Structures are given as structure tokens and as C-alpha cells.
Image (cartoon, rainbow, N blue to C red):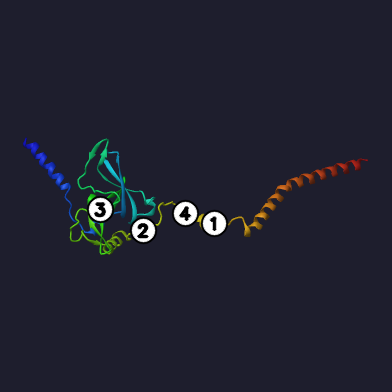
Amino acid sequence: MNRILLLSVFYFQFNVMATTFIPLSLDKQLEEADGVVLGEFKGLEYRKINDGRILTEATFKIIKSAGIKQSEIVNKNNFKVVYPGGEWQGLVYKVSGAPKFFKDEKSLLILKNTPYGYSVKGLGMGKYEIYKEFDKTYYKSAVFPGHAKLGKISSKTLNNSLEKMLGESLVTKSSDLFVFKSNTTKKVKSEGRAPASIGNSRTVAEQLDKKEEEASNPYWLVILFAFMGAYSAFSMRKHRK
């Protein structure tokens, strides 16, 4: 009985530890991060991965981002972010400390690139809520909203940290869809092919005339050789007479 009680206490303590967050500076949270996204939450889906774990796949419309290549976004209106837990076949798999999102909510996410896609770094610690004060935008930690340093981060402070840790500040994406263009395609575009009209019409006409002339040459050769053969036979007959 004591052993079972001890195991129960240990399990309870483990779960408490799992839900305990330590406040870290923004720069510290951005260490080893692969990008940051300011996006609008659109919906949830769930999937089961190879090891049997359930993942939640949240869809966002990207408003701004930093540190993420355009080719990795593909569609800014349908950007996926994953984190552990979710629902599968009627069962709910809860993970303590996982972030929570509300329909059309705008938030800032610190992301880590994983084999399963971009995930929220540090679970709930990787989410920052957005609010305005005197027409200025501020960000606050979803876990420590009242913290002296994490509860009110100005846009300037945020961008300074992003530039220092990720190499760029938040930037707006210019297009909804990204189409990858290979170097070959770019080379063809840069060299280009002039349309067969106006300035090139004379050149095209000359090329066609040349092709027609080349195509007709064999026929003239056949006629010439036939004439030479007939003339040779006529000369031989005349010589015999």
C-alpha cells in the first residue's frame, strides 16, 4: 500500500513539475528557435504519428514572420503549427502546458522546426498574446502575462531581439502563395526569347525562305543528274553512228 502511495505521489509530483514554467528572458526563449510567426488562428486538426503519439495541428494565417524562409511557408493563409496532445478516435490526450488558441485570435509564436513540422517551442511558453495600449502594440507571455519583463514587450524591443537572435525583424509576407523557381527557370527568364513579331519578323521570314530553299535543293539535284544522264546516253549513241 505504501509503495502504491509512493508511486502515486511520485506521479503527481512529476505532473506538477511538467506544468511548472520558469520565466525566461525573450532572448533566452529565442535561443535555438527556428522562427517566429505572428498569425491569426483558423482551426485545429489531429494526427497520429509513427510512435503512437497524438499531435494537434493548428492552422494559422500568417500576418508577419521572422527567420522562416518563404519556401517553407508555401501558403501564408494555411500555415501549420504542431504541439503534443489532442483527440483521436473519441479519446482526449491532454498534455499539461500545451498552448490554447481561440478562433481568429492573433498571437505571436516562437517556433522550432521538427521532423513533424514547425512546433511551438516550450509549449505554452512559446505563445505571446497581442494587445494595444495608447495605439501602441505590445506582446505579453501567455504563461506569465503579469511578469515585469514578459508581460509588456514593445514592438521595438521584440524586433531588436529578433534581429539579434534570428537575423531579421517581423516582416509582412507579400503573396498568398509561393511558387518555387529553379535556377534554370530564372536563367531562361533573364536571357529570354524575343517574340516572333515586328523586329524579328524579317529574320523569321529569312529563316523560312532558307528552309524552303534547302528543302527544294534535292529535287533540283535529281533533275540535274537525270538531264546529265540523258545527255551522256545521247552522246554515246551519236558517237556509235
Which residue is labeled 1 in the image?
192
Give the distance between the C-alpha atoms of the residues marked 2 and 1, in whole angstroms. Answer: 31 Å
Mark 2 is on which residue type?
Thr
Q: In percent of the image, x 34 and y 53: which residue is there?
A: 62
Which residue is labeled 3 in the image?
127
State the image quarter where residue 27 is shown: bottom left
Earlier-in-chain disc, 3 versus 2: 3
Discs 2/1, front: 2
Q: In percent of the image, x 19 and y 45: which residue is there?
A: 96
Q: Secondary structure at mark 4?
A: helix
Earlier-in-chain disc, 3 versus 1: 3
Q: Callout 1: 10 Å neighbours few (<14), some, many (20+)? A: few
Discs 4/1, front: 1
Give the distance between the C-alpha atoms of the residues marked 3 and 1, in whole angstroms. Answer: 47 Å
Earlier-in-chain disc, 2 versus 1: 2
Q: In the visual, does 233 lie left or right of 209?
A: right
Residue 183: image tag: 4
Q: Callout 2: 10 Å neighbours few (<14), some, many (20+)? A: few
Residue 172: image tag: 2
- Direction right: furthest residue: 241
Mark 1 is on which residue type?
Gly
Residue 181, how many percent across, how many down? 45, 52
Give the distance between the C-alpha atoms of the residues marked 4 and 1, in whole angstroms. Answer: 14 Å
Looking at the figure, which quarter contains the N terminus? top left
Q: Nearer the viewer, residue 54 or 128?
A: 128
Earlier-in-chain disc, 2 versus 4: 2
Residue 57: image tag: none
Residue 145, how many percent across, how many down? 20, 56
Note whether residue 67 is visible.
Answer: no
Residue 97, how many percent across, how many down? 20, 48
